Amino acid sequence: MSRRRSYLAIGAALLGCQADAFVPRLVGSGGVSSSCWRRNNSDGPECERRTESRLYVGGRIDPAEDRNQAPLKADGGPEGGENADLLPAKEADLPFSALWSMLAGTGGGPPVQVDDTNLLIYDVFLLVNLSASISFWVVHRMNFLFLAESLNEGALLCICWIISGLANGAFLYSAVDGHWDPSGKDADKGGPKAAGLLGLSTFVGASSIRILIALAVAVADHRPVGSGGEALIPLEILVGLILMSSWRALHSANTPRL
């Protein structure tokens, strides 16, 4: 028993010595006064200042001066403008009009908008009336059973007209002169003739879209083209080219210029 007690006393003494030697190394390595670690020590009060971090993991790696590079700026690029292309483009830097200009070609395209809503309403009325008249007076010979089908075909033709018209700027105020400046040196190129040609070009685009839709639907349904309202397409194209170009030329001739 006496030997065991002596061994335990020796072990306790060794542990106490190691603990006393370990605490100063922790304090010294962390850069903090001993009062911060020994809160119950009578030598000083509790720690009144924050510990100073000496960890440099991840520190002083991102600052630009350590790499001898100029920091990027979101407003105008870096100082000197060498890395301006590296910054992500803002939403306001790429408006839809600029994207449309790139899609339309190097010369750009008209803005995709509707200025003259009354002109658009008249166009829709004429196209729906065109399809209904062809179906009722020519194709189906005054048969009211096909009236709803003709109205459906007219609505689809109007959608094609609107798509083509937005691409050609047919609903802008400048469409009355075919997008020529009436007060400039090219004033003689505008007028009813240019407006009629613009209407002709717009209807050609609308007819092309309508034919593509008919082909796509026929392929999807595994049937020949020409059933239903598609039977009106040949006469719609023939009469529509004359109707819409004449209507646009007449509208241009009777529209006062400011």
Image (cartoon, rainbow, N blue to C red):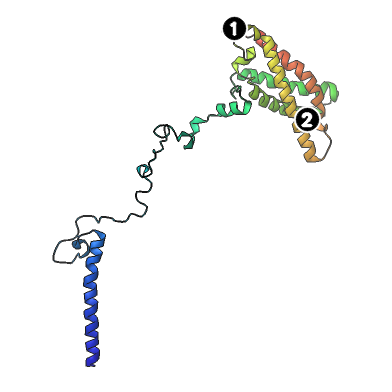
Q: Residue furthest front?
A: 68
The answer to whether residue 28 is left or right of residue 239 is left
Question: Can you tell which mark lies on residue 185?
Answer: 1
Residue 155 position, x and y percent, is 71, 27
Q: Nearer the viewer, mark 2 or mark 1?
A: 1
The residue drawn where x is 24% and y is 85% is 8
Numbered label attached to residue 149:
2
**Residue found farthest to the left:** 43
Image quarter for residue 164? top right
> Dot 1, crowdedness within 10 Å: few (<14), some or many (≥20)?
few
Q: Secondary structure at mark 2?
A: helix
Rendering coords of residue 48 (x, y %): 19, 56
Tell me which amino acid carries mark 2.
Glu
Residue 159's quadrant in the figure? Answer: top right
Sequence-wise, the earlier of marks 2 and 1 is 2
The relative height of residue 119 versus residue 33 in the rendered view (above or below) is above
Say which of 165 and 179 sits in front.
Answer: 179
